[in-house]
Image: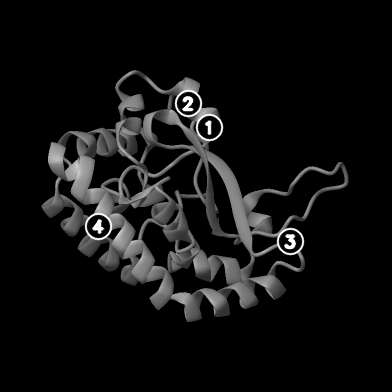
Amino acid sequence: MRLYGCFFKRIADMAAAGIGLLALSPVLGVVSLWLHFANKGAGVFFFQERPGLKGRIFKVVKFKTMNDKRDSDGNLLPDSERLTRVGRFVRSTSIDELPQLWNVLKGDMSLIGPRPLLTSYLPLYTVEQSRRHDVRPGVTGWAQVHGRNAISWKSKFEYDVWYVDHMSFSLDMRILLMTVMKVVKREGISAEGQATVEPFDGTN
């Protein structure tokens, strides 16, 4: 695992991300145009700071699936009201994750690993949960193929730490295959009763 995690995994990530960006460029172009009109000027890409390897902060890039509609006080409306019909489709098919191949190519992320979460969650993790940052975050991961946003935060972090302890080439290939199956079935897109996922508050 050590040699794979320190050397071969990064080479595989770079090769796969480079080939993926080239092969998927027509899809990325069409989706960008689609979202440009659906978001009504709110932009096509979503950039946000996330903690990566060893907690180092980087900017993750995804397709923007929500508009920027606000209430009379200037506050953003709830996710459920800002998620467009086009955005819902892009999310359900996981197309919104494809721009992260650029993060993989840069070295911010890996294809497989714990998902990069909000920086505001950092002080809320237990020592055990924070071990998820011992590896590069991934476009997909062990928690994603076991329920994605439909499982509890506790379970999600347990899956993340388990992956850190068991990372291997064979496990990554297994996760990739399981990810394809999840995407086809469109499972675990959101938490029950939520348009996306309930925020982590350090207890749930």
**Quick check: marks 1 and 2 in contact, CB under 8 Å?**
yes
Residue 1 visible, this angle: no
Query: Around disc 4, counting alpha carbons within 10 Å, would you say few (fewer than 14), some (14 to 19), or many (20 or more)?
Result: some
Query: Around disc 2, counting alpha carbons within 10 Å, would you say few (fewer than 14), some (14 to 19), or many (20 or more)?
Result: some
Horizontal side of 138 relative to 118 (left or right) equals left
Q: CA distance from mark 1 to mark 4?
A: 27 Å
Horizontal side of 120 relative to 148 (left or right) equals right
Q: Give the structural element (helix, strand or loop) at label 1.
A: helix
> Mark 4: which amino acid?
Ala
Query: Around disc 3, counting alpha carbons within 10 Å, would you say few (fewer than 14), some (14 to 19), or many (20 or more)?
Result: some
Residue 37, image quadrant = bottom right
Residue at the disc numbered 1: 119
**Quick check: marks 1 and 4 in contact, CB under 8 Å?**
no
> Mark 2: which amino acid?
Leu
Q: Residue at x 30, y 31 (%)?
A: 134
Q: Residue at x 58, y 66 (%)?
A: 87
Q: Give the structural element (helix, strand or loop) at label 2.
A: helix
Q: How many marks?
A: 4
Q: CA distance from mark 2 to mark 3?
A: 28 Å
**Dot in front, 1 or 4:** 4
Q: CA distance from mark 1 to mark 2?
A: 6 Å
> Mark 3: which amino acid?
Ala
Residue at the disc numbered 2: 122
> Mark 1: which amino acid?
Thr
**Looking at the picture, how far across and down is residue 84, in whole percent?**
64, 66
- Picture layout, residue 127 above or below residue 116: above
In the foreground, 12 or 132? 12
- Answer with mark 1 or mark 4, whichever residue precedes in sequence: 4
